[in-house]
Every structure is written in C-alpha cells, then in structure tokens.
Image (spheres, rainbow, N blue to C red):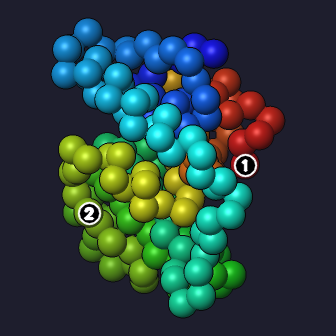
Amino acid sequence: DMGVCSGVLSAGLARRGGQRVVATDQDPRALACARDNLQRMQLLDRVDLQQVDRFPPGRAPLVVCVGRVDEQKGQDLLLRAWPLVLAAHPRARLAIVGDGPKLAALQAGQPERVDFAGFSPRVEEWLAAADVVVIPSRWEGMPLLALEAMGCARPCVAFDVNGIQECLGDSGV
C-alpha cells in the first residue's frame, strides 16, 4: 500500500494499514509530520472503529465545512440547504471553518445552529471533531479536503461536480 498525502491524510492512511506514505510537500516539517503520524497511528491499529459509538446519547452531530469562504466553495448553498438538515436533525450543528470575501454576508443572515469559526491552521482538529464533512463547492480541481476527510475516516457529503466525482466516485453522496 502506498498513498500520496498531506500530514492529515497520512494519519488516516496509516490507520487503514498503509505501509508507505509519500508526503506531497517538500518541507522537512511536513515530511516529519507524515512520518510521526504513521508511527502514532500504527499504535491505534488495534482499535476496532466499528465498536466506537459515533452518536452517544445527548450528543448533537457536528457537520464541518472547511474552506475559503467565496463563490466557488458554495457555503451559501450549504446555508440554503441547512434548514432541511435541521428539520431532520434539530440538534445538529454546522461549523464553517475559513475566511474570505463572502464571510460577512453569510454571517449577516444569522443562520440557526451555525458557528463561523474563521480561519484555522488546525484543520485536522476540525476533521477529528466532525461527524460529517461537507463540501458544497460549485467546482473543484482535486479536493484535498475530501481526501483528508476520508483519511480521517469521516463521511463526506459533496455536490456532484468535477473533481469531487474523481475523488469520491460512486461512494460519494
């Protein structure tokens, strides 16, 4: 098994039993991160993830959307659909992680059960906390977030656009 990945994705590949990890960054810190994640995740290989209760009683599901807040990334489309999610799951929370030219306009609408977290250099922490990762992009090239979400064993819901299709294939929603 060999995977091409960032530090976040390397952890997921290691958890899935990957033998070799190829970091996409030449930066020695990124290479060290990939190596360290692989070593740490090998210790977790004995954990049966099927036995972990993803929705313990009383806990609200967390939906996370990470990305630049602009026209391409489609957070406005996500917020238009969010009331449908709340109708089915009234306790769900949405975290929009990122900054950009559309942020103020989205915040002005004061959507229910939505937190605007702003820019975060620690995307892996948001992915670890997420029950579902959503990618509402209008278009994508190669969506690194989808790869990172899968690497962290998080379900990913995305619009059916180029880039997402190649990444998620028929398994995507």
Q: Which mark is residue 173?
A: 1
Q: Please state which of residues 48 and 170 is positioned toward the viewer in this rendering.
A: 48
Mark found first going from the N terminus, 1 or 2: 2
Asked if residue 92 shows in the view, the reply is yes
Please give the name of the residue rendered at 33% of the width and 79% of the height, measured from the top-left corner. 110
Corner quadrant of residue 115: bottom left
Give the labeled residue for mark 2. 117
Query: Does residue 100 appear anywhere in the picture?
Result: no
- Asked if residue 32 is positioned above or below residue 83 in the image, the reply reads above
Where does residue 84 sit, x and y in percent of width and height? 64, 76
- The secondary structure type at the circle numbered 2 is strand
Q: Residues within 10 Å of mark 1 (few under 14, many from 20)?
A: few
- Name the residue at 47% across, 17% down: 21
Residue nearer the viewer, 68 or 48: 48
> Which quadrant, please, contains the N terminus?
top right
Q: Is residue 87 left or right of residue 31?
A: right
**For the residues bearing labels 1 and 2, Cβ distance under 8 angstroms:** no
In the rendering, which numbered label is found on residue 86? none
